[in-house]
């Protein structure tokens, strides 16, 4: 029984690590999208001036 509890604890820790990584990845993609949108906005504004 002690072994089972140890494995469940390890699985719980692994799941928390995966959730943390997923949050970091999501955050990074949001930042990348913002930069892409800012670049596109700047490009469109430049095209409007020309």
Image (tube, helix red, strand yellow):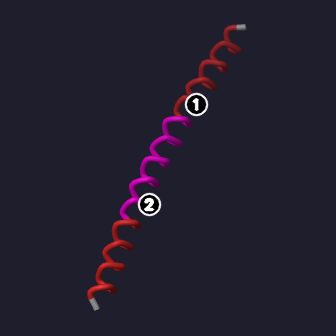
- Residue furthest left in the image: 2
Badge 2 crowding class, 10 Å Cα cut-off, few under 14, some 14 to 19, many 20 or more, is: few
Residue displayed at 45% across by 44% down: 27
Tell me the chief SS of the magenta region. Answer: helix
31 magenta-colored: yes
Residue 33 in percent (x, y) is at 56, 37
Badge 1 or badge 2: first in the primary sequence: 2
Q: Quadrant of residue 8?
A: bottom left
Q: Quadrant of residue 1?
A: bottom left
Label disc, if present, on residue 20 of the rendered structure? none
44 shown above or below 26: above
Residue displayed at 60% across by 23% down: 39
Residue displayed at 46% across by 55% down: 22
Boundaries of the magenta span = 16-33
Q: Quadrant of residue 45?
A: top right
14 magenta-colored: no
Helix, strand or loop at label 1? It is helix
Q: CA distance from mark 1 to mark 2?
A: 28 Å
Badge 1 crowding class, 10 Å Cα cut-off, few under 14, some 14 to 19, many 20 or more, is: few
Residue identifier under label 2 = 18
Residue 48 in percent (x, y) is at 68, 14
Residue displayed at 42% across by 52% down: 23
Q: Give 24 or 38, whichever is nearer the viewer.
A: 24
13 shown above or below 40: below
Q: Give 5 or 43, whichever is nearer the viewer.
A: 5
36 on left or right of 17: right
Q: Nearer the viewer, mark 1 or mark 2?
A: 2
Label disc, if present, on residue 37 of the rendered structure? 1
- Residue furthest bottom in the image: 1
- Residue furthest front in the image: 3
37 shown above or below 49: below
37 shown above or below 14: above
């Amino acid at each position: 029984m002690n072994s089972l509890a140890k494995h469940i604890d390890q699985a719980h820790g692994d799941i928390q690590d995966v959730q943390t990584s997923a949050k970091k990845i999501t955050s990074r993609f949001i930042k990348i999208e913002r930069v892409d949108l800012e670049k596109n906005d700047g490009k469109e504004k430049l095209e409007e001036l020309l």
